[in-house]
Image: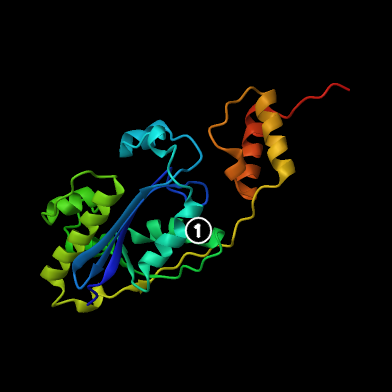
Amino acid sequence: MTNSYIAVDLETTGLNPKTDRIIEIAALRVIDGRITEEKATFVNPHQQLDGRIRGLTGIEDGMLADAPDISRIIGEFAAFTQDLPLLGHNVLFDYSFLKRAAVNHGLKFEKEGLDTLRLCRMFMPRDLSKSLGPACAYFQVELKNVHRAMDDARAAHMLYQTIRARHGAADAELFLPRPLIYRIKKEQPAAKRQKEVLRELAKYHRIDLTVDIDYLSRNEISRLTDKIIAQYGRIRRDI
């Protein structure tokens, strides 16, 4: 059974790694079941958080204003993971955001994973919620601040240790890491003309953009431009 891993948790602006961004990363290096090192940081997403995310996490825009960009963090995080598997509650969610960030900054990030959500689905009653909070309550694992990265990462680690202690002897194969599969191609930065068009549209329609245009990819700026045109229309120029 695996007992050395990186317990990881992210907070993000939403659920879609293609359109949303990381706002907080926490990771615990666990060797032979013991935490040996911790890392945690806010990440500046270069966009305003919506009310739902602020309410869910307690993270405010001001807390992220001076945080580093993901480009300054992802290399250090990738090095921190070494060759250890990632552990998390629905770990593919966290991996998808991390791999997208890594690939966009020229890094390889192929990992195996241990998923406490998968284990909870196997060892908890069917009628109980398997989300992190209820799972921790069922297995009597402390969870201090749900939806904060370090607390969630620590809870996932303790949840794994608890389930492993109870069920590992009989079902050892369930506690082996599996390859994490998430395919992505590197995104291209937005072109100068794309930025100009978006700024002109925003000015013309008097829209206060909630994102920093200079940090948008080509696909992101194209989607945002199309969304504004669909909602407000194109710029009408007098002939």
Q: Is residue 48 above or below residue 161?
A: above
Picture coordinates of residue 203 (x, y %)? 67, 25
The residue under the point 51% across, 54% down is 71
User: Is 9 left or right of 193, judged from the image as shown?
Assistant: left
The residue at which mark 1 appears reads as 100
Q: Quadrant of the C terminus?
A: top right
Coloration mode:
rainbow
Q: Is residue 157 above or below residue 215?
A: below
Picture coordinates of residue 26 (x, y %)? 32, 54
Q: Quadrant of the N terminus?
A: bottom left
Picture coordinates of residue 127 (x, y %)? 19, 52
Front residue (pair 138, 71) = 71
User: Is 36 left or right of 219, judged from the image as shown?
Assistant: left
User: Is 108 left or right of 129, judged from the image as shown?
Assistant: right
The residue under the point 11% across, 68% down is 166
Q: Secondary structure at mark 1?
A: helix
> Are there few (<14), some (14-19), or many (20+) residues within 10 Å of tag 1?
many
Q: Is residue 202 above or below residue 108?
A: above
The residue under the point 72% across, 36% down is 197
Picture coordinates of residue 16 (x, y %)? 46, 49
Q: Is residue 17 visible?
A: no
Front residue (pair 153, 105) = 105
The residue under the point 44% across, 39% down is 66
The kind of residue on which mark 1 rests is Arg
